Amino acid sequence: MLKYFLVLVGLLISATAQAANQPQLLGEYGDWTAWTYNDRGNVICYMASSPKKDEGKYTKRGDIYTVVTHRPSEKSFDEVSFVAGYVYNPKAHLVIKIGNEVFRNTFTEGDKGWMVNHAEDQKLVTAMKRGERMIVDGQSSRGTATKDTYSLKGFTSAYQAISAKCKKK
């Protein structure tokens, strides 16, 4: 009987540990949602949104979203990443438009894209805070052009939530 009890306690501890590593919702803010989770003792905060409109002559496409991540233990804040729902053309760059601003300093790998450095991330985040919508133009490995239009409604509030949780001032 004791053996079964110890197995049950072990399972409960394991389940509790796994639950602690699951993302915890910080809140929904307009068209953006903010989360936090614990990765081996390090707090990570992120916010994400899906486009309101996705365009392109494709027959099948996976999930599409943009994420802004803070990793305070690595002193990494404002990392913007894009997930296309297809494999990007490695020779093509993303073109991101917010109002009159255009961002081209990007790179891609597989189905993900990023800004080339932290300074470009910060410029993009600043524009996202001020803007109303963001358009991300990409190209698949098959040459298909796509245009994803995101609402920036709630971006600043979601950003404030992840910054408060991950101590970005």
Image (spheres, helix red, strand yellow):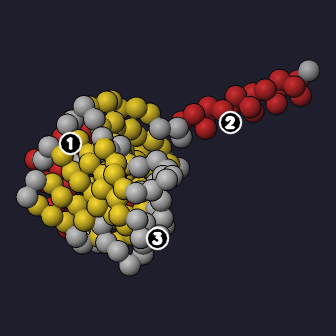
Dot label at residue 40:
none
Look at the image and tell me in which quarter the N terminus lies.
Answer: top right
Q: Is residue 134 above or below residue 2?
A: below
Neighbours of disc 1 within 10 Å: few (<14), some (14-19), many (20+):
many
Q: CA distance from mark 2 to mark 3?
A: 41 Å
Residue at 29% from the left image edge and 61% from the top image edge: 137
Q: Position of residue 149 (x, y in %)?
A: 26, 48
- Does residue 88 appear left or right of residue 98 in this picture? right
Residue 134 in the image, given as x and y percentages of width and height = 21, 51
Which circle, 3 or 1, is nearer the viewer? 3
What separation in Å lies between label 3 and label 1 (alpha carbons)? 28 Å
Circle 3 packing at 10 Å, graded few (<14), some (14-19), many (20+), is some
Is residue 125 positioned above or below 51 on the image? Answer: below
Which one is in front, 144 or 111?
144
Identify the disc placed on residue 152: 1
Instruction: Report the side of 32 relative to 43 (left or right).
Output: left
**Spot occupied by residue 159 in the image (x, y as percentages of width and height):** 24, 42
* Amino acid at dot 3: Ser
